[in-house]
Image: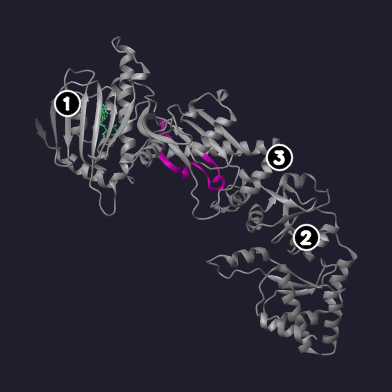
């Protein structure tokens, strides 16, 4: 038996490997299975040029076995095996990849089946193993060998009696300790789930002995347990299949199998791109919003595969935040992986794919809006908020992508419409796109400010979600038509008799309005006779960029900076309340004017859903009116 020590660099590297490179220990199985698959691929390539080999798929597989008594896990393949020299070079030197060399020597252009390239994956076994034994028979050699290592100190190689071509790797699991139980890698369910997760699309069968229940022959309802060898992996990735061969049901099954969700997706997209960067993707628009979607816990992203091997479960870089609800996977042969296969070396490739995917999703949604209105609206009710956030965030740079996809409720029949639809049915003389913001359609349509615009026969957009007005403000205009809040300053409506009388009243009652403004002590920027009130006595309007609805949203944020809307108090000069105010003012009853003003102002705050600044004082003031 020959005992060899690892080279100095290899020692350090091995330590690094075991402790630092991989974030999850379970990936050791992915690495060993990928090696086994590479070894079988090499037999496949051998068969292409060697008449002595017939590549009968039945004979090529990977078998995973456990031995609970000895606490071992074995990965056996019927691949090409290793000669003594190969054992020394490939397993004795870290960062030596026989697979990469094979790929280069054989000029396998797309090399699409060979996975190994760094020459480190094998050593990930030491994350869970105290000892690794490799027994191998090379197709190219007469002798078989056993390679054995307990980690950094080195390895031994000795000849063993001949065996079938291929390799068996036996992992002697580390002792369990308080923080970690390595026995998990002996459990059937755990192994099955790791295989499904990372190696589902390895081209060769991965077999595992599984416990199954059979109906007992003699007794009704009784079952007996039996152990059977089962192929765990799917093998043929659905994304490599021809679209015409796949049914909606196949896509939905894949969605469920990959646990993207328990719902039925409303749309799937099957993308095959063969450009500068080749990739395949299957994307879904879920039918139901995930329960944690609008929380910080929700992780967006697509599964990322390289050559059918799972690299990342949630690659967030593949999806813009506003399409974060999309589920699915991307597989590419062209990714530059880093050594752990967890992070990508270059994000340029990823960016190209992400850009492409973004356009595909956008176009798909546009098509859906055009051709499947009902389905689109259902989708929008689930994920529309996210699209509207997209308009608002990132300084509005995604507006162009999203402005045609967002919808709002309309006053016309309280149904959802797009901005395009609104603009198309605007009468010629309508200067602005009008909107009213509030908690619910019911509340919004009753706001005093909405009355006048509706009386003009103009359509109103009802903005009932917090993000709505922020998105609208970010857009500024749509097709050159500016947005205007009914609660904002000038509504640009044609002047009516009431308008000029309101202006007249404001002028005539200047001293009263000044006294009222002073009584409110800086809470409002102006007090005036209203052009917009019809039946209500009073309302608040916002003067600047921040609306009252936006103030409410901003105030509710944890880090609110006390941002407030500039508010004007508008009084209905035709209302009895105003007559009372005037009387009190004319009679020099200043305290009474102050009392009325305070009550009216707080009433206006209540209508807007703003909190009362001093509820006790308000209650006392109301009591004084009796
Ligand atoms: N089961 C196996 N059968 C035959 N050769 C193997 C087997 N496992 C490993 N090898 C050889 O050992 C080499 C080193 O394996 P290792 O997993 O460390 O790296 P790799 O697979 O080449 O690259 P990567 O780190 O990207 O996975 C492989 O390139 C291959 O030549």
Tell me residue 210's x, y (percent). 37, 34
Mark 2, residue position: 445
Residue at (71% x, 72% y) in the render: 605
> Which is nearer the eye, 35 or 490?
35
Count neighbours of disc 2 (C-alpha within 10 A) and say few if under 14, some if 14 to 19, many if 20 or more.
some
The N terminus is located in which quarter?
A: top left
Q: Is mark 1 within 8 Å of ligand 1?
A: no
Label 1: state its secondary structure.
strand
Q: Can residue 162 be seen in this view?
A: yes
In the rendered view, tell whether residue 132 sits above or below residue 597.
Answer: above
Mark 3 packing: few (<14 Cα in 10 Å), some, or many (20+)?
few
Residue 162, placed above or below residue 442 = above
User: In the image, is the residue at mark 2 within 8 Å of ligand 1 by its beta carbon?
Assistant: no
Q: Residue at x 71, y 68 (%)?
A: 608
Which quadrant: the C terminus?
bottom right
Q: Where is residue 256 in the image (x, y as percent from the top left)?
A: 52, 38
- Dot 3 or dot 1, earlier in sequence: 1
**In the rendered image, the vertical position of residue 458 relative to residue 370, given as above or below:** below
Give me the C-alpha separation between circle 2 and circle 3. Answer: 25 Å
- The residue to which callout 1 is attached is 145
Left or right, 518 with respect to 356, comes to: right
* Boundaries of the magenta span: 305-327
> What element does badge 2 sit on?
helix
């Amino acid at each position: 038996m020959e005992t060899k020590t690892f080279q100095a660099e290899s020692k350090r590297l091995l330590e690094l490997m075991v402790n630092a490179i991989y974030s999850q220990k379970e990936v050791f199985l992915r690495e060993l299975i990928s090696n086994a698959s590479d070894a079988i691929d090499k037999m496949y390539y051998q068969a292409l040029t060697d008449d002595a080999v017939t590549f009968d798929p039945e004979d090529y597989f990977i078998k995973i076995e456990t031995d609970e008594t000895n606490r071992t896990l074995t990965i056996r393949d019927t691949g090409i095996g290793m000669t003594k020299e190969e054992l020394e070079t490939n397993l004795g030197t870290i960062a030596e990849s026989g697979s990469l060399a094979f790929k280069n020597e054989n000029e396998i252009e797309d090399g699409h089946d060979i996975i190994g390239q760094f020459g480190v994956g094998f050593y990930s076994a030491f994350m869970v193993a105290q000892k690794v034994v490799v027994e191998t028979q090379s197709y190219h050699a007469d002798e078989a060998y056993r390679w054995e290592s307990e980690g950094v100190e080195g390895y031994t190689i000795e000849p063993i009696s001949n065996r079938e071509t291929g390799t068996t790797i036996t992992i002697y699991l580390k002792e369990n300790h308080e923080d970690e139980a390595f026995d998990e890698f002996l459990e059937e369910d755990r192994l099955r789930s790791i295989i499904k997760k990372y190696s589902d699309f390895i081209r060769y069968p991965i077999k595992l002995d599984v416990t199954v229940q059979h109906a007992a022959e003699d007794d009704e309802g009784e079952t007996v347990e039996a152990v059977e060898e089962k192929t765990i992996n799917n093998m043929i990735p659905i994304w490599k299949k021809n679209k015409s061969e796949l049914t909606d049901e196949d896509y939905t099954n894949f969605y469920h199998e990959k646990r993207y969700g328990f719902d039925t997706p409303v749309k799937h997209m099957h993308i095959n791109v063969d450009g500068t960067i080749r990739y395949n993707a299957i994307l879904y628009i879920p039918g139901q919003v995930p329960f944690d979607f609008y929380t910080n816990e929700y992780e967006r992203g697509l599964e990322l595969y390289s050559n059918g091997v799972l690299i990342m479960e949630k690659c967030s870089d593949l999806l813009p935040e506003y399409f974060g609800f999309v589920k699915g996977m991307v597989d590419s042969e062209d990714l530059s992986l880093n050594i752990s296969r967890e992070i990508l070396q270059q994000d340029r490739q990823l960016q190209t794919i992400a850009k492409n995917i973004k356009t595909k999703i956008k176009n798909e949604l546009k098509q859906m809006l055009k051709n499947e209105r009902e389905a689109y609206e259902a989708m929008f009710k689930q994920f529309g908020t996210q699209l509207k956030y997209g308009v608002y965030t990132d300084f509005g740079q995604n507006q162009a992508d999203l402005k045609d996809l967002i919808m709002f409720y309309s006053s016309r029949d309280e149904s959802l419409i797009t901005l395009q639809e609104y603009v198309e049915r605007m009468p010629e003389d309508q200067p602005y796109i009008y909107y009213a913001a509030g908690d619910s359609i019911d509340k919004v349509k009753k706001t005093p400010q909405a009355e006048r615009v509706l009386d003009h026969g103009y359509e109103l957009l009802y903005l009932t979600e917090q993000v709505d007005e922020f998105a609208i403000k970010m857009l500024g205009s749509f097709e050159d038509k500016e947005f205007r809040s009914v609660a904002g300053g000038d509504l640009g409506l044609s002047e009516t008799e009431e308008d000029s009388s309101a202006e007249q009243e404001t002028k005539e009652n200047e001293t009263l309005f000044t006294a009222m403004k002073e009584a409110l002590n800086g809470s409002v920027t102006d007090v005036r006779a209203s052009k917009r009130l019809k039946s209500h006595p009073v309302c608040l309007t916002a003067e600047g960029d921040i609306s009252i609805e936006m103030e409410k949203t901003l105030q509710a944020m944890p880090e609110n900076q006390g941002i407030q809307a500039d508010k004007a108090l508008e009084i209905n000069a035709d209302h009895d309340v105003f007559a009372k105010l005037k009387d009190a003012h004319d009679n020099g009853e200043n305290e009474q004017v102050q009392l009325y003003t305070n009550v009216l102002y707080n009433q206006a705050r209540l209508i807007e859903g703003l909190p009362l600044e001093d509820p006790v004082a308000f209650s006392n003031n109301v009591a004084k009116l009796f």
